[in-house]
Image (tube, coloured by chain):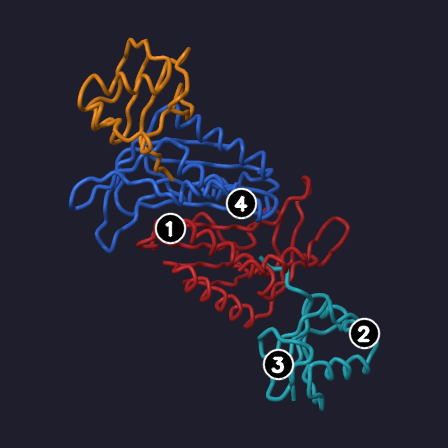
Chain colours: A red, B blue, C orange, D cyan
Amino acid sequence: MRLSVQAQAFDPGAETTAFTKTATGAGAVVTFTGLVRDNGGTLSAMEIEHYPGMTERAIATIMDQAVARWSLVDALVIHRHGRLAGGEPIMMVATAAPHRADAFAAAEFLMDYLKSRAPFWKKELGPDGATWVAAKDADEDALSRW
Amino acid sequence: MRLSVQAQAFDPGAETTAFTKTATGAGAVVTFTGLVRDNGGTLSAMEIEHYPGMTERAIATIMDQAVARWSLVDALVIHRHGRLAGGEPIMMVATAAPHRADAFAAAEFLMDYLKSRAPFWKKELGPDGATWVAAKDADEDALSRW
Amino acid sequence: MIEVLYFAWVRERIGLPRERLDTQATTVAELVAELSAREERYALAFSDLSSLRVALDQELSSFDAPLAGVREVAFFPPMTGG
Amino acid sequence: MIEVLYFAWVRERIGLPRERLDTQATTVAELVAELSAREERYALAFSDLSSLRVALDQELSSFDAPLAGVREVAFFPPMTGG
């Protein structure tokens, strides 16, 4: 199990290769990568603020729950903070399990909890200035399915 | 959209990097990789038979459905045939969408249909000989959710 | 003339991957009956149709489907890809 | 003494990321009332508690939670990670 909250860019492909190689006994690996969206051709930048200390604690708690509930062979969470350019990976989640249903469910669970329970805040830096991204009711609602 | 049915090994990480780089406009990329399971330490090999021609047609049909239904920015399916060693990637699916729920749903849909509707047959080569993998009722049942 | 293909354990039981047939069968079920009557290995391969699938010209189909105009029939067990 | 942290637009409205306070407040709500009474920028930041979250010693908590033993209080908007 690995968790990294970092300012540096990362390569989701290289992380996937490393994660898959060490997932002994797994039959299924699911990865999710979140990217800074390119809104209609104008690449926007993003600034991500976080709460050092609480971020790592919150993510570790969520990961422990996922590993136990879906008998994961391994799990990975990487989340960036600081300034990101359009198109860059913001974060990724990877899960490895004997069977695909568990790997998918655990990855979706991790994403839903990261969205609403890990202390990150996104600010979009567009041509018209900076705007804090508003939390969506749908993200909070998504938690009720687990 | 890319579809490859191939005998050669592939690197899910390198494929993920290439797929993510060209997924312009996507906010979410989901990948699934299926691996030859290492059953309790004894790495087993696998032989995958397929129906050339029908395989490509069946997968292309499934991919078209997924792209339309979840407004995917892009989709990728790679599936190997022939002999595979324990731990090797068998196949992968990748989906890119503006939002995560669509990317996840489309990847699960593609997996469910590939399992039961693409003409591949797996034979496990273990220490006690070769056995055709039996289809699971659960895999057929999984289709009913779409 | 029709091309008949066999995959996985169906291929192994019948002992060949494909053959060209001259048949009067008008449905898949009639073709199965014709083949089963021919030799024991066919009868064995087709003994439980519920464990078999059929594709007509590379599209999944059913055993009561007509064969008119069909060039390629394939018999195989339920798929296990992914 | 208690450490109070502010994040995202709460930090921007109040104008500082953290401060050390000597407070008699026994609950989060009392602390909020005390801060709001201090200066307009605090009153503005805390004007709608339904759009705020609070963490006590780095665990999500509620506004009626007691402050006894707590060393670090953080106020912030709903999270938007992932």
Are labels 4 and 3 on one chain?
A: no
Determine whether, in the image, residue C78 is placed left or right of residue B143: left
Above/below status of A83 relative to C3: below
The residue wearing badge 2 is: D41
Q: Residue at x 45, y 54 (%)?
A: A94
Labels 1 and 2 in the same subunit: no
Q: How many marks?
A: 4
The circle drawn on residue A99 is: 1
Sort mark 3 into few (<14), some (14-19) or many (20+) by Cα contacts within 10 Å: some
Q: Are marks 3 and 2 on the same chain?
A: yes
Amino acid identity at mark 2: Arg
Say which quarter of the image contains residue B103: top right
In the displayed structure, would residue C51 be above or below residue A112? Answer: above
Image position of B39 (left or right of A113)? left
Alpha carbons under labels 3 and 2: distance apart:
21 Å
Amino acid type at mark 1: His
Numbered tag placed on residue B105 in the rendering: 4
Q: Is residue B53 left or right of residue C38?
A: right
The residue where tag 3 is placed is: D72
**Residue B112, horizontal then vertical, whole percent:** 44, 41
- For residue D26, which numbered disc appears in the image? none
Type of amino acid at the residue the image marks with label 4: Ala
Residue in view at x 34 percent, y 26 percent: B51
Find residue A83 and report its horizontal and vertical position in percent: 62, 57
Measured Cα–Cα span from mark 1 to mark 2: 53 Å
Question: Mark 4 or 3, which is nearer the eye?
Answer: 4
